[in-house]
């Protein structure tokens, strides 16, 4: 499901910008770290070491959610640009619609009926 969409994405280099749960959906706004071979990869900007693209990790019909910090509990990285970032993801694991995600947003575990990586227009 999500594993295929993450090919060519270095998860541990994806910067977390925000997260929220609304109407049973968990959305995580990120700057996705793309590497050569990813379908929308482009050469990095002069001040970046790889291609970064704004994206949303969207999990729908989430249940059994545990370990999510509220954004109020987490401080942005000092000196981070606009928008501020909260650090990078540590990992994303998927096993039969059960997910584990680690990073500044907490040590999450949950079920989701669907998961998508949606890229935004730069």
Image (cartoon, rainbow, N blue to C red):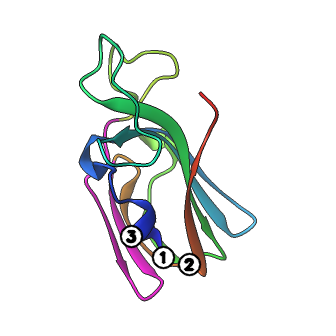
Q: Residues within 10 Å of mark 1 (few under 14, many from 20)?
A: few
Please identify the residue farthest to the bottom as the structure is shown: 96
Query: Per the image, is 97 magenta?
Result: yes
Q: Is residue 15 visible?
A: no
Q: Is residue 18 above or below residue 68?
A: above
Q: Determine whether, in the image, residue 29 is placed left or right of residue 90.
A: right
Q: Determine whether, in the image, residue 28 is placed left or right of residue 50.
A: right
Q: Position of residue 36 (x, y in %)?
A: 29, 42
**Looking at the rendered structure, which numbered label has been put on residue 112?**
2
Q: Secondary structure at mark 3?
A: helix
* 93, 34: nearer the viewer: 34
Q: Position of residue 58 (x, y in %)?
A: 59, 59
Query: Residue, x 41% and y 68% (percent of image)?
Result: 4
Q: Position of residue 16 (x, y in %)?
A: 42, 40
Q: Position of residue 7 (x, y in %)?
A: 34, 59
Q: CA distance from mark 1 to mark 3?
A: 6 Å
Q: Secondary structure at mark 2?
A: loop
Query: Residue, x 56% and y 63% (percent of image)?
Result: 116
Q: CA distance from mark 1 to mark 2?
A: 11 Å
Q: CA distance from mark 3 to mark 2?
A: 14 Å
Specify which label sits upstream in the sequence, 3 or 2.
3
Residue annotated with mark 3: 3
Q: Residues within 10 Å of mark 3 (few under 14, many from 20)?
A: few
Query: Per the image, is 101 magenta?
Result: yes
Q: Is residue 107 above or below residue 77?
A: below
Q: Are marks 3 and 2 in contact (CB under 8 Å)?
A: no
Q: Residues within 10 Å of mark 2 (few under 14, many from 20)?
A: many
**Which residues make up the magenta segment?**
87-103
Specify which label sits upstream in the sequence, 1 or 2.
1
Q: Are marks 1 and 3 in contact (CB under 8 Å)?
A: yes
Q: Are marks 1 and 2 in contact (CB under 8 Å)?
A: no
Residue annotated with mark 1: 1
């Amino acid at each position: 499901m999500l594993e295929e969409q993450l090919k060519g994405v270095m998860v541990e280099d994806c910067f977390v910008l925000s997260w929220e749960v609304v109407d049973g959906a968990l959305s995580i706004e990120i700057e996705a770290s793309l590497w050569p071979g990813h379908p929308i990869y482009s050469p990095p900007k002069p001040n970046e070491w790889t291609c970064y693209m704004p994206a949303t990790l969207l999990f729908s019909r989430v249940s059994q959610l545990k370990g999510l910090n509220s954004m109020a509990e987490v401080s942005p990285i000092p000196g981070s640009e606009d928008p501020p970032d909260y650090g990078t993801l540590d990992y994303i694991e998927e096993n039969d619609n059960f997910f584990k995600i680690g990073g500044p947003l907490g040590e999450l575990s949950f079920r989701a009926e669907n998961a998508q990586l949606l890229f935004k227009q730069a």
